[in-house]
Image (cartoon, rainbow, N blue to C red):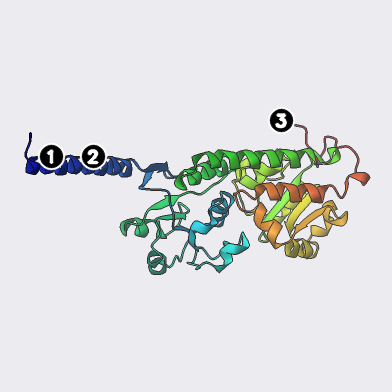
Amino acid sequence: MRPRSALRRAAVSGCAAALAALVLVAGAARAAGIELHDDRGRAVTLAAPAARIVSLLPSLTETVCALGACDRLVGIDRHSNWPASVRELPRLGGLEDTQIERLVALRPDLVLLARSARALDRLEALGVPVLALEPQNLRDTARAAQVLAQALGRPGDGAALAARLEGRIAAAAARIPQALRGRSVYLEVAGTPHAAGSASFAGELLARLGLGNIVPASLGPFPQLNPEFVLRADPFVVMATQAAAAEMPRRPGWQRLEALREGRVCAFGPEPWDTLVRPGPRLADAAEAIADCLQRWPGRLAAPAAGPHNPPPR
């Protein structure tokens, strides 16, 4: 029979070995972590699902919340305003003037920001985990949802959110009156004027709804236009903020636009406008707002025909 001291030593040794094995397993799990790839093509590894998140881009803030993780946000940029619950969070500036010290004091385990944010390099130098995501089109929007779902430890939720977005956009497209399909649209995003071109996410949304765009992709996503460009294009429908739409008839020469004379204008208030100019999960809301607006006119419109308002497909 083995002496008791030997048995005790064996038991202690066995426990130590078991503990060591557990430590190794845990260490391996931490080392593996959650590997993400951002829009810079860089790999970002999290030891665990992000629990304290700072979002410095409204579309990313909205995506986190649409994934059911608003409660993990601890700070936001100055422009994030949806859902209402985020408005109580600390505001940390924007792309050009992020308040680094305040941000670091919040102890985030992940910061979401645009590739163009000035704070990006400094935050990385401070050892703060950053994920640079800057959706430019509908595909990017779906990908951002999937990457953020992974970061939250809910990998399946991203694809589900993207599928819901697609389904709602398709349903809105089915509501566009036949008489307006293919009609040309001028979507003004700033009064200088800047417009949403065919290459932008907003332009893609118009195309998904079966609408045309007076701004070709070759001019870039959001080009500044010569006002004469808009007058020559003579869009069938004008879309803008309420303030811009009210001011347009006073611009030199814009009284010639038939869309303004005939009232074919979608003038959006602040909340629906936000959904239209942010490449996030509320683009489905934007599609529905556009469909709601366009349903006001079809009773007095003829079916579309090839012409300046509705060029033949190419």
Mark nearest the camera among 1 and 2 is 1
Give the residue at x 47% y 67%.
Answer: 92
Q: Which mark is residue 10?
A: 1
Q: Are marks 3 and 2 in contact (CB under 8 Å)?
A: no
Which residue is nearer to you in this view: 46 or 294?
46
Q: Secondary structure at mark 1?
A: helix
Residue type, label 2 = Ala
Give the residue at x 37% y 53%.
Answer: 129
- Quarter of the picture containing the N terminus is top left
Mark nearest the camera among 3 and 2 is 2
- Quarter of the picture containing the C terminus is top right
In the rendered image, which residue does mark 3 sit on?
314
Horizontal side, residue 43 vs residue 225: left or right: left
Which residue is nearer to you in this view: 3 or 182?
3
Q: Secondary structure at mark 3?
A: loop
Q: Earlier in the sequence, mark 1 or mark 2?
A: 1
Which residue is nearer to you in this view: 278 or 261?
278
Residue 251 falls in which quadrant of the image? Answer: bottom right
Question: Could you give the CA–CA distance between mark 1 and mark 2, rounded to whole angstroms?
Answer: 16 Å
Q: Are marks 1 and 2 in contact (CB under 8 Å)?
A: no
